[in-house]
Image (cartoon, helix red, strand yellow):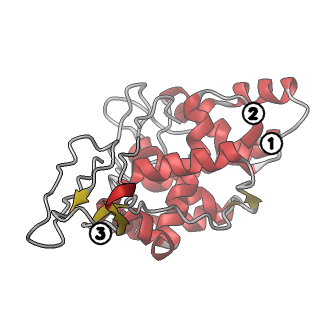
Amino acid sequence: MAFVRPAVTVAAKIIAPNAGAIPVPNLNPSKVSAVIHSDATTAVKPLALNKPELPLLDVDFCGECLPLDQTDVVDRWKHVFTLFRTHAEDLGNLRQRADAFFPTINPILEKYDIPDDFRYVPLAESGLRPRAVSRAGAAGYWQLMPGTARELGLKVGKRVDERFNAQKATEAACRYIRRLYDQLGSWSLVAAAYNAGPGLMKTQLRRNDHRDYYRMQLPRETRYYLYRVLLYKEVMSRPKDYSSFLWPAQTEQTAFRWWPALEIARLG
């Protein structure tokens, strides 16, 4: 519910193939240097370094598929994964918090007939940190704003703040999510409305002749919000499928190709 959210240089060492080779330092990573034999007959040229590619797997939110046939969707999906990769080493700690939190909220989601995928919303909202408070004043696992929390029946005050109670806050959040679904009729739109508020999403529905979250012109945070929720779903449910991207080898090998000396050219 919070309205504000936060967001290599690889140096290749070229080694001469024999004692007579003279290394040429690659001072500019954007340029390609060559190593020339002293007999001026052959040279070695480094090929492009391997970069980990994000696997584009079938992904859905509450049965609504992520349309990876759209270029802008793929770009946003890669963007959130790239940002998360710098924090991937914390995934073990996040899993421990989830193992303690999910058994509390799963029965409540079922009680309100809300799909399991919404259990990943608190990961995107608070990182499952129970005392999390945003600059805007949203608090707790579900990052409920004070006014919204009170409207949903929670006590919010200096002495008692039930937004920090996992069970009570989840009950309140589920009541709110169920209400949003009754208004919007799409779980993707519900997730977006949880982030930006129902008023914004209703305005979008009036302006557009479609109900597709992925095609709407939304504020940046809301535009990326569902991608972040889906990221947590993916890395929590099948981390091995993304391991080659999240945890690439510490040392990447540079490939070399031998070229006749007369064909040596520096490539821009």
- Given contact means CB atoms under 8 Å apart, are the residues at marks 3 and 2 in contact? no
Q: Residue at x 59, y 62 (%)?
A: 108
Identity of the amino acid at label 2? Met
Q: Earlier in the sequence, mark 3 or mark 2?
A: 2
Q: Viewed as shown, does residue 54 lie left or right of 267?
A: right
Residue 206: percent from the left, percent from the top? Answer: 86, 25
User: In this figure, which residue is indicated by the disc labeled 3?
Assistant: 253
User: In this figure, which residue is indicated by the disc labeled 1?
Assistant: 212
User: In this figure, which residue is indicated by the disc labeled 2?
Assistant: 216
> As displayed, is residue 187 above or below residue 207?
below
Q: Nearer the viewer, residue 193 or 35?
A: 35
> As displayed, is residue 20 above or below residue 157?
below
Is the residue marked by circle 2 packed among few (<14), some (14-19), or many (20+) residues within 10 Å? Answer: some
Is the residue marked by circle 1 packed among few (<14), some (14-19), or many (20+) residues within 10 Å? Answer: few
Indicate which label's residue lies in the foreground, 3 or 1: 3
Identity of the amino acid at label 1? Asp
Q: Quadrant of the C terminus?
A: top left
- Given contact means CB atoms under 8 Å apart, are the residues at marks 1 and 2 in contact? yes
> As displayed, is residue 135 above or below residue 14?
above
Residue 120 appears in the picture as rendered: yes
Residue 94: percent from the left, percent from the top? Answer: 36, 62
Residue 184: percent from the left, percent from the top? Answer: 80, 40
Q: Nearer the viewer, residue 124 or 28?
A: 28
Instruction: Determine the secondary structure under disc 2.
Output: loop
